[in-house]
Image (cartoon, rainbow, N blue to C red):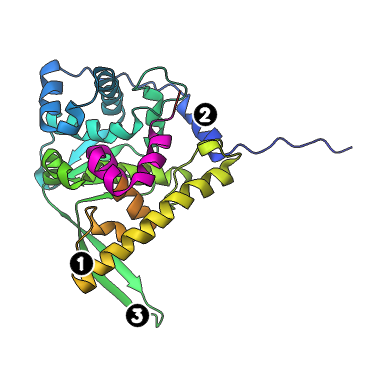
C-alpha cells in the first residue's frame, strides 16, 4: 500500500512561514522630530490615519535595523535619508503582516529578506547593458537609471529622485516604491508581474487560480495602457497620466502602477478603477 505523500507547500504558504519568523534585529528608535520632518516632506504619508502612521513608524524601525545603507561616489547617507527610504519602502507592507490586527506587523518585512544593502547614488547611475542579436553580434551600451532592484541583491536608488518624492507624487512617480515592488514581484524567483498570492485571493481556490485572477485584471490594463502610449507617441494623442515606462513590460507596468497607487490613490483610481480594486484586495486585505 502506497503511503500518500504530503502536498508540497505553495509559494504563499512558504512565504507565510518566512513571515512568521521573528527577527533577532532590534528596531531602531526613531526620534519624534525626525519622524515629523519625514512626514512633512512626504505628503502621501502625512495624510495616513494615525494608526497607519504609527504602524509605518514601527515598520521603519525594524527595517532600519535589518538593512545597511551605502552612499556611492562619496555620498554621505544621513539618518534622515535612510528614514525617507525606509518610510516609502515599508508603505506597501503596511497591511501585509500575517493575521495582523493593526497596521505595521514587522513580520511583513520578510518580503524583503532576500537582500540587505541599499545603495544611494548622488544622481542617475550608469548601468552597463549588453544584448546578443540573432546573428551573434553583441551590442553594448550604458543606461541611465534612477533605481534598480537586483534579484537576490541590493537595491540601488538615485537620492535626488528619492528626495523629490513629495513633489513627484502628483505624477504618480516614486522610485523607492517602484523598486521595492520589483522586490515583492521577485519573491517567487521570477519577474513575472505577480507576487506570491494567498491561494484564496479574490475568492479563488489554489495558487494557480489566484495567479490567473491577478493577471486576468493586470494584463488587459497593461495592454490598454500600451495602446495609449503608442497613440500618444505615433499620432500625437494625449499622453497617459501614468509613466510611459510601464509599457516596457508587464512587470514594469506592475511597478509603475503600484507606485502611483500608493502616492496618488485618487488620480490612480480615476484612470485605473479595476487595478485599484485589485491592489486593494492584495495590499489592504480584509481581516
Q: Which of marks 2 and 3 is in front?
A: 2
Instruction: Answer whether residue 279 is magenta in the image.
Output: yes
What's the mark number on residue 137?
3
Q: Name the residue under label 2.
A: 17
- Say whether marks 2 and 3 touch (CB < 8 Å): no
Q: Is residue 45 visible?
A: yes
**102 and 265: which one is in front?**
265
Whole-Å distance between the Cαs marked 1 and 2?
49 Å
Question: Mark 1: few, some, or many residues within 10 Å (few <14, many ≥20)?
Answer: few
For the record, the magenta segment spans: 258-285
Question: Which mark sits nearer the N-terminus, 1 or 3?
Answer: 3
- Disc 1 secondary structure class: loop
Q: Specify the principal SS of the magenta part.
A: helix
Q: Mark 1 points at which residue?
A: 237
Q: Please give the name of the residue rendered at 48% of the width and 30% of the height, measured from the top-left corner.
A: 18
* Whether residue 19 is situated above or below residue 154 in the rendered picture: above
* Whether residue 263 is situated above or below residue 218 in the rendered picture: above
The image quadrant that residue 117 belongs to is top left
View extreme (right): residue: 1
Instruction: Answer whether residue 211 is magenta in the image.
Output: no
Q: Please give the name of the residue rendered at 35% of the width and 39% of the height, measured from the top-left corner.
A: 115
- The x, y position of residue 89, in whole percent, is 27, 35
Amino acid at each position: 500500500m502506497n503511503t500518500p505523500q504530503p502536498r508540497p507547500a505553495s509559494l504563499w504558504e512558504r512565504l507565510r512561514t518566512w513571515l512568521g519568523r521573528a527577527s533577532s534585529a532590534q528596531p531602531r528608535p526613531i526620534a519624534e522630530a525626525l519622524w515629523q520632518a519625514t512626514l512633512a516632506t512626504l505628503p502621501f504619508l502625512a495624510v495616513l490615519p494615525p494608526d497607519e502612521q504609527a504602524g509605518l513608524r514601527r515598520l521603519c524601525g525594524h527595517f532600519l535595523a535589518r538593512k545597511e545603507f551605502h552612499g556611492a561616489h562619496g555620498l554621505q547617507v544621513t539618518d534622515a535619508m535612510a528614514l525617507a527610504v525606509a518610510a516609502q519602502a515599508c508603505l506597501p507592507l503596511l497591511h501585509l503582516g500575517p493575521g495582523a490586527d493593526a497596521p505595521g506587523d514587522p513580520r511583513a518585512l520578510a518580503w524583503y529578506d532576500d537582500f540587505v544593502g541599499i545603495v544611494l547614488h548622488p544622481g542617475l547611475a550608469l548601468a552597463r547593458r549588453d544584448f546578443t542579436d540573432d546573428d551573434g553580434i553583441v551590442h553594448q551600451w550604458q543606461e541611465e537609471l534612477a533605481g534598480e532592484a537586483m534579484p537576490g541583491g541590493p537595491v540601488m536608488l538615485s537620492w535626488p529622485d528619492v528626495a523629490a518624492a513629495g513633489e513627484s507624487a502628483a505624477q504618480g512617480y516614486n522610485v523607492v516604491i517602484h523598486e521595492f515592488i520589483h522586490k515583492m514581484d521577485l519573491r517567487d524567483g521570477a519577474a513575472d508581474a505577480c507576487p506570491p498570492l494567498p491561494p484564496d485571493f479574490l475568492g479563488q481556490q489554489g495558487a494557480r487560480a489566484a495567479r490567473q485572477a491577478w493577471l486576468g485584471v493586470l494584463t488587459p490594463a497593461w495592454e490598454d495602457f500600451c495602446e495609449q502610449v503608442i497613440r500618444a507617441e505615433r499620432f500625437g494623442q494625449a499622453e497617459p497620466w501614468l509613466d510611459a515606462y510601464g509599457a516596457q513590460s508587464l512587470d514594469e507596468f506592475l511597478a509603475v502602477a503600484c507606485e502611483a497607487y500608493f502616492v496618488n490613490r485618487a488620480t490612480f483610481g480615476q484612470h485605473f478603477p479595476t487595478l485599484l480594486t485589485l491592489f486593494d484586495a492584495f495590499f489592504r486585505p480584509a481581516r
